[in-house]
């Protein structure tokens, strides 16, 4: 059975959950990786952009180092995602 392709709201929900500390970054990365790797799916530019932000959101420059992307930066991505959605309407 094929899983339903996530919509923009679900993608935004993951970004927001990471920004607010409600979602584990490793889980968000694994969730996005599952969708990024499926060439049969079609994404809007906005959705693709956000999935690529989530894919790798758990990266650190080294063991015990802070994440490459701060929670503040992830909040900025949420705002950018929303701006891009408003521009599509």
Image (cartoon, grey):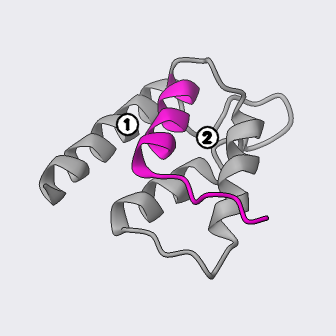
The percent position of residue 60, horizontal first and vertical second, equals: 73, 41
Where residue 79 sits, quadrant-wise, is top left
The residue pinned by badge 2 equals 68
Q: Nearer the viewer, residue 48 or 1?
A: 1
Residue at point 54% right, 59% down?
52
Q: Nearer the viewer, residue 68 or 36?
A: 36
The furthest residue to the front: 1
In the image, taking residue 81 as reference, residue 54 lies left or right, namely right
Where residue 43 sits, quadrant-wise, is bottom left
How many C-alpha atoms fall within 10 Å of the one at disc 2: few (<14), some, or many (≥20)? some
The residue pinned by badge 1 equals 78
Of badges 1 and 2, the one in the foreground is 1
Q: For residue 62: magenta?
A: no
Residue at point 63% right, 81% down?
39
Q: Is residue 30 above or below residue 63?
A: below
Where residue 72 sits, quadrant-wise, is top left
Residue at point 50% right, 36% down?
15
**Which label is found at residue 87?**
none
**Cα distance, mark 1 to mark 2?**
17 Å
- Label 1: state its secondary structure: helix
Q: Which residues are magenta?
A: 1-19
The percent position of residue 10, horizontal first and vertical second, equals: 50, 42
Q: Main secondary structure of the magenta part?
A: helix
Q: For residue 17: magenta?
A: yes
In the image, taking residue 4 as reference, residue 72 lies left or right, namely left
Q: Quadrant of the N terminus?
A: bottom right
Q: Is residue 18 above or below residue 45?
A: above
The percent position of residue 55, horizontal first and vertical second, equals: 64, 54
Q: Quadrant of the C terminus?
A: bottom left
The percent position of residue 20, horizontal first and vertical second, equals: 52, 18
Q: Is residue 63 above or below residue 19?
A: below
Residue at point 69% right, 29% down?
66
């Amino acid at each position: 059975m094929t899983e339903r392709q996530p919509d923009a709201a679900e993608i935004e929900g993951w970004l927001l959950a990471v920004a607010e500390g409600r979602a584990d970054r490793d889980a968000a990365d694994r969730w996005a990786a599952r969708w990024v790797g499926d060439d049969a799916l079609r994404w809007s530019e906005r959705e693709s952009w956000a999935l690529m932000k989530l894919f790798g959101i758990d990266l650190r420059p080294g063991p015990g180092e802070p994440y490459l992307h701060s929670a503040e930066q992830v909040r900025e991505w949420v705002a950018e995602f929303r701006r891009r959605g408003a521009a599509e309407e």
